[in-house]
Image (cartoon, helix red, strand yellow):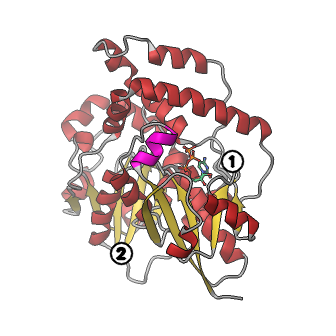
Amino acid sequence: MQKEIRIFAGGCYDLMHAGHYNALRQAKATFLKEGYERVHLVAGVCSDAAIAANKGPPVVPHSERVEIVKACKWVDEVAADLPYGQPAQLFDDLRIDFTVLGDDHAPGGSLYEQAMRTGKLRIVKRTEGMSTTELIGRLMTLSRKHQIKSGKDPKGLVSELDSENKGATKPVLLPTIGRIVDFRGQAEAPAGHRVVYVPGVWDLFHVGHVRFLQQAAKHGDFVLVGALGDDDVNKRVGRNFPLQTLHERALSLLSCRHVSDVLLGSPWKITQDMIKTMNISVVCHGNTDFWDANRLDCDGLGDALELPRKLNMLVKIDSGCDVTVYTMADRIWQHAEEYTVRQKKKEEEAKKYDEKKAFVAEK
Ligand code: CTP
């Protein structure tokens, strides 16, 4: 058996989520389980024009999607700016041995057709309850109040989508311990390691998070990310935040190459016991006012960073990137009508898939 292979996993990877990450993780795991020693994963990322022509405008621009996919720990290489249905020629151009596809996709495009004919295609389980469509829906709901107040929903688009969704029982992400363990992997802390602790919300994992974590990683050799619980986030930020549940956020974090481990539902206040127990050397935070002690008093949560500040172990990081959840909500609202059409079409497709869905084992 050939020891090293190159495999391909193409996609749009828009609003990157646990479903995309699980597809990339399974792509690699499939071949390692088949006995190959080294599996080089090439993730193919579609161009903005290709997505716009086939699905509707992408929320996240191509350069950011490429950066986020590159930061995924199972990805070894990115092939950027690809057309939607990938040509068979890619097998030669990228020296690909095998390709993978989610069980929701019919093998369209000559790459997949040829792979199927020649036994070079593997199907991986689509992750339930997570999709770009679902996240766009949550972002649209988030925008509702301020958009309607400023008269930007004259056609009642959001109200229309809301009433259609009422009473629907949608699939949700099922975060088993086995899945969390598979995402976490085996990475152990090196001896005498220096733990960097980075608490936060990490909603809709985006390029700002990637750049921030990349910088935090320079302050030590084990990045422990604190992911605040859903109630703490809501208490602090209000509205319908967080848009993603704790487990959805944690799976995205665990997929990032700059993250060593995630503390689920991390305590709001960093305590002496936490510092000792987790062997924390540095605490990093960003330059938003999220942790601002003056604002915190109003929420009754107290100053989360008081102790690391007193102990002189607090480092402020500027990611140099101003993308936030609101940036994505605004991108959607700039094309509200197109997104409404897109949502209806994709929701129909999802319904059809869910009705026909059969069991596929997760790799
Ligand atoms: N994928 C998955 N589970 C999901 C969503 C996507 O396994 N919940 C897989 C798809 O099957 C595909 C890969 O992720 O192999 C890339 O998906 P992409 O091209 O970005 O688009 P969609 O499948 O349409 O993803 P989404 O529904 O989130 O838009």
**Which amino acid, by three-letter code, is at mark 1?**
Asp
* Residue picked out by circle 2: 221
Which range is magenta? Answer: 48-55
- Report whether 111 appears left or right of 62: right
Quarter of the image where one finds residue 313 = bottom left
How far apart are labels 2 and 1 at the CA level? Answer: 39 Å
Residue 2, x across and y down, in percent: 67, 88
Q: Residue at x 22, y 59 (%)?
A: 314
User: Could you say whether the residue bearing mark 2 is in a helix, strand or loop?
Assistant: loop
User: Does residue 312 lie above or below 228 as drawn?
Assistant: below
What numbered label is drawn on residue 322?
A: none
Q: Would you say the magenta stretch is mainly helix, strand or loop?
A: helix
Residue 155, x across and y down, in percent: 42, 11
User: Does residue 285 lie above or below 133 as drawn?
Assistant: below
Q: Nearer the viewer, mark 2 or mark 1?
A: 1
User: Does 177 appear in magenta?
Assistant: no
Residue 24 in sight: yes
Crowd band around label 2 with a 10 angstrom C-alpha radius: few (<14), some (14–19), many (20+): some
